[in-house]
Amino acid sequence: MLGCASVAQRLLPESSPALPALNDVIAAARRAAELTRQLLAYSGKGRFEVRAIDLSEHVREITHLLEATLPKKVRLELELDASLPAVEADHGGGPRGEAERRAQGRSGERLTGRARALTSARRQSVARSFLQALLA
C-alpha cells in the first residue's frame, strides 16, 4: 500500500487536490507499519529500533494524534525547544505510543481550555543507586 501510494504521490502535480489526502494515506500506512513492528517487538518476534530522535520533531509529527484525543473546546499549544540534543530511544515508542494509548476513552469528556505540549532540556540529579538498579 505504501509503495503504491508513494508512486502515485510522485506522479501527481503539486497542485493536485488529491495530494493532501494521498499524503494522509502515506502517513497512515507508515503508522500502521510502525505499529506492526512494535507489536512484533513486544511479542518477542521482532526487535526494537533504538536510534537518535529529535524529540521536538517527534512531538510535532504526532500533533494530529494529540489533537484528536482532546475535546473540541480544548486548544493544543506547542512549546517545542528546537535546540534539544537528540535522545536515544525506540523510534516506535515514545510520545507517539503514549499519545495512541491516551486516545482511548477520551472522546466523551466535556473539557474546555488549553493543553500544552512542551519539550525542554534541564539538568537533573539522579541518585547513584537508581542508576545502578536501572542498569543491573
Image (tube, rainbow, N blue to C red):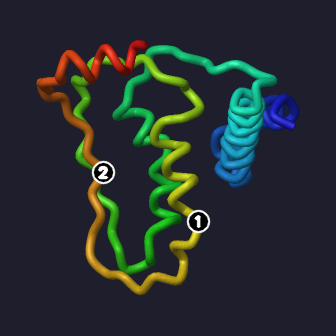
Residue 52 quadrant: top left
Callout 1: few (<14), some (14-19), or many (20+) C-alpha neighbours within 10 Å? Answer: few
Is 57 located above or below residue 79 in the figure? Answer: above
Residue 104 badge:
1
Is 113 located above or below residue 27 in the figure? Answer: below
Instruction: Give coordinates of residue 109: x percent, y percent.
Output: 46, 82
Pointer 2 or 1: first along the chain: 1
Instruction: Give coordinates of residue 43: x percent, y percent.
Output: 76, 32
Is 27 located above or below residue 72 in the figure? Answer: above
Amino acid type at image mark 2: Ala
Q: Looking at the picture, tell me which residue is in the foreground, 39 or 18.
A: 39
State the residue position of label 2: 117
Q: Residue at x 55, y 62 (%)?
A: 103
Q: Residue at x 44, y 78 (%)?
A: 72
| 55 sits left or right of 35 in the view | left
Residue at the far bottom: name it: 110
Q: Quadrant of the C terminus?
A: top left
Amino acid type at image mark 1: Gln
**Label 1: element kind:** loop
